[in-house]
């Protein structure tokens, strides 16, 4: 039994090593992507109606298959300069840490964002954002297993050539991202949308954790496109359909779905201070079916999500994918207490 367990782990390690160039070169993702808007698009920095926005999110996935892949994220953004015509300059900070698998492959990233929002009347806005940051990627080699550590029928850890020569412990690099977004609300406030596009890793930094001279391995550019709608269908019910597409090297992701938001209690007519519950159904193409649920009240949004795996890993994972919990708070502008909306509200 011990030998079988070791052979199993060796096989898993071999798979990890063989797929390392792909795994090392992919960015993180969240099911509740509206809880981490600056990860999606730098132009979403400060794209909200309020004084300041703070958020935090936690994701845990693949716990039924291996050591869980865990991701933490936290962010803050706010308008810095607001002009009389509603143009404004905003800034933000996004932090996240991702830790994956037996080898504790870890990625810590800190990003500073700046965005300018050009208002067209009171109902439309064009935003452009720029983002820069620092990342550190590391791995704990002592927790990995290599085939040449199996010597004369016994397992001898730490003897692998890969351990001593092939792979380093960490790599540091800088990131540059940019994006555009356009948002619009109807005059009656019953329909709005946000449309955006971004290009991340513009500088394509070398993130190769292997010890190779003149390595050409770099972090591929990630392209994103997103559309989110806000449709008021009655006095208490709002629909929030959205589509997110991301592409990086040979990997792509398409998420589509809808969230039902229902105001509970109080005077009909939803605002950010109303108490409401939401339930959403989402589909990540070829990977997972997701459900989101939570509550909004007094500027807070608290949400949870669960991914049911439908990919080729379904048998091994028993359908278990990822779990997330997130919280977001937007401090209101004084204009909100007067019932006046001056900035189109972004879906993301």
Image (cartoon, grey):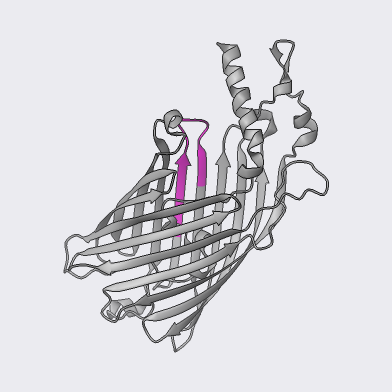
Tell me: 61 left or right of 132.
left
What is the number of callouts on the image?
0
> Measuring 68% from the left and 58% from the top, which residue is drawn there?
204
Q: Is residue 268 above or below residue 204?
A: below
Q: Is residue 61 magenta?
A: yes
Tell which of 314 and 92 is nearer to you.
Answer: 314
Tell me: 31 left or right of 178.
left
Which quadrant would the N terminus be assigned to in this image?
Answer: top right
Residue 47 in percent (x, y) is at 45, 71
> Measuring 61% from the left and 18% from the top, which residue is drawn there?
6
Residue range (magenta)? 55-71
Tell which of 328 and 105 is nearer to you.
Answer: 105
Q: Is residue 105 magenta?
A: no
Tell me: 347 left or right of 154.
left
Tell me: 327 left or right of 110.
left
Which quadrant would the C terminus be assigned to in this image?
Answer: bottom left
Residue 227 in percent (x, y) is at 41, 65
């Amino acid at each position: 039994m011990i030998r079988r367990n070791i052979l199993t782990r060796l096989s898993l390690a071999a798979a990890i090593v063989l797929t390392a160039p792909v795994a090392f070169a992919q960015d993180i993702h969240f099911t509740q992507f509206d809880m981490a808007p600056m990860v999606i698009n730098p132009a979403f920095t400060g794209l909200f109606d309020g004084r300041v926005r703070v958020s935090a999110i936690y994701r845990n996935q693949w716990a039924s298959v291996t050591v869980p892949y865990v991701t933490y994220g936290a962010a803050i953004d706010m308008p810095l300069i607001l002009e009389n015509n509603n143009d404004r300059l905003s800034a933000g900070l996004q932090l996240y840490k991702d830790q994956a698998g037996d080898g504790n492959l870890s990625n810590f990233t800190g990003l500073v964002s700046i965005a300018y929002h050009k208002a067209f009347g009171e109902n439309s806005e064009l935003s452009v954002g720029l983002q820069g940051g620092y990342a550190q990627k590391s791995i704990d080699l002592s927790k990995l297993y290599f085939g040449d550590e199996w010597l004369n029928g016994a397992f001898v850890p730490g003897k692998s050539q890969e351990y001593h020569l092939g792979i380093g412990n960490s790599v540091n690099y800088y990131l540059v991202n940019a994006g555009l977004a356009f948002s619009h609300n109807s005059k009656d406030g019953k329909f709005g949308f946000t449309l955006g596009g971004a290009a991340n890793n513009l500088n394509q930094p070398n993130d190769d954790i292997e010890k190779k001279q003149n390595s050409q391995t770099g972090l591929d550019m990630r392209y994103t496109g997103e559309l989110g709608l806000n449709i008021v269908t009655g006095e208490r019910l709002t629909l929030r359909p959205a589509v997110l597409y991301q592409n990086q090297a040979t990997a792509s992701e398409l998420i589509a779905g809808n969230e039902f938001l229902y105001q509970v209690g109080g005077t009909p007519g939803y605002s950010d201070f109303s108490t409401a519950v939401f339930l959403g159904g989402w589909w990540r193409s070829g990977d997972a079916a997701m459900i989101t649920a939570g509550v909004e009240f007094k500027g807070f949004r608290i949400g949870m999500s669960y991914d049911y795996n439908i990919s080729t890993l379904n048998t091994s994972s028993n359908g278990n994918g990822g779990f997330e919990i997130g919280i977001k708070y937007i401090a209101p502008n004084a204009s909100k207490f007067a019932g006046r909306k001056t900035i189109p509200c972004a879906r993301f």
